[in-house]
Image: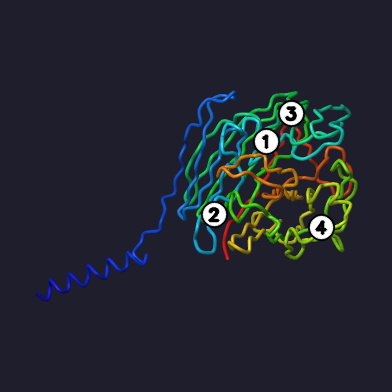
Amino acid sequence: MFQNRFFAVATLFAALLLLNGCGKKTDHKMSIEKKSIGKTELGEANLYTLTNANGMKVVITDIGGAVTEIWAKDSKGNLANVALGYKDHKTYVKNPNYFGCITGRYANRIADGNFTLEGEKYSLATNNGPNHLHGGDQGFDKHLWEGEAGTGEDSVFVKFTRTSPDGEEGYPGDLNVTVTYTLNNADELRVEYEATTSKPTVINLTNHTYFNLAGEGSETILDHELTLHADKFVATDETNIPTSIDDVEGTPMDFREAHVIGERIEEENEQLKFGLGYDHTWVIRQDSKDEEGLSLAATLVDPESGRVLEIRTDQPGIQFYSGNYLDDTTTGTSGKTYPLRSGLCLETQVFPDSPNHQDEEGWQSCVLLPGQTYRHVTVHKFSAR
């Protein structure tokens, strides 16, 4: 009789544990899954879903190597997608918003679509008013990349490769490019870029993910708090071409301490008028490098959910774009449309129009020569508080 009573009590206790969630298994298996999107005008396309041991997920397509979803936890442990993307994955073939993509050969703008390298003048497409933007009419975002998935000791990754042929979009040299996305168990999404060239060329690669830490489909990022570890920013003219490197002191460009993004965005300021909001590059301070040589560039916080994004990079600049051209006409992953400033970008890179500032003080070279290897590392660390 004692044994029967003991068994009944033990069974009841176990049931109570399960009801209270105490006995619930929360571990996830680290994995990577490849799934076909189907045929597109570029060819057969795929999605790669990277999942770590904490349940964080990153979904990436081989169309433009674009990040389509990032599932991160809030302060209560709830997962939500914090990256903007298209409901129809085949829209990535055109990608008018550059959602999540590998951006190149040259991310950001080149004045008048022209530059001179080693005495030779090159002319590129002018696809952004009078200027060249994000690699031209058919930039890296509008090509199908070759994907290869793999697993590390505490991470999963997908490696994308393609060769941009000599003369593509007006750029010189065959450019062999590798971009590797790695998700580890520290909830870090690491992006590594490598490239080699057959001729002297210019290069500036980045990732163009739009973030909303409140969750994709939320209406605004104006309530997010942003810190940019930068004392200077690249001032521009009315076409967003650099004119000078200026101090942030005393301007709405000063994010050295955390500011709510919407706090000063409507101020009467020439730079905010030119960018229709924030659409500038900040010069990252180099006083906080880790053992890998990466500097802390930005910290983004959504106070409501508690989600935090920290970005470290080896690049000299970070472009903060506050979603000024989102206009409620794009249907997102969740089926909701994206209104003005419902997502923001934090793109690590060299400065805009660097090909035309090669010999100027404070500008890092964007020139890649045969025999050299272009390298760029950026780490996105997700957490909650």
The location of residue 76, given as percent across then percent down, is 51, 64
Label 4, residues with CA under 10 Å away: few <14, some 14-19, many ≥20: many
Label 4 amino acid? Answer: Met
Label disc, if present, on residue 253 of the rendered structure: 4
Judge whether 104 appears above or below 11 on screen: above
**Marks 2 and 4: in contact by CB < 8 Å?**
no
Position of 10 with respect to 312 (left or right) is left
Extreme residue in the bottom direction: 2
Label 3, residues with CA under 10 Å away: few <14, some 14-19, many ≥20: some
Q: Secondary structure at mark 3?
A: loop
- Give the residue pinned by disc 3: 137
Q: Which quadrant holds the C terminus? A: bottom right
- Give the residue pinned by disc 2: 72
The location of residue 178, given as percent across then percent down, is 62, 36
- Give the residue pinned by disc 1: 195
Q: Secondary structure at mark 4?
A: loop
Camera-nearest residue between 340 and 358: 340
Residue 104 visible to an observer of this rendering: yes
Q: Which dot, 3 or 1, sits closer to the camera?
A: 3
**Marks 3 and 4: in contact by CB < 8 Å?**
no
Mark 4 / mark 3, whichever is N-terminal: 3
Spatial CA distance of label 4 from label 1 is: 33 Å
Spatial CA distance of label 4 from label 3 is: 31 Å
Residue at (84% x, 31% y) in the render: 113
Residue 117 visible to an observer of this rendering: no
Label 3 amino acid? Answer: Asp
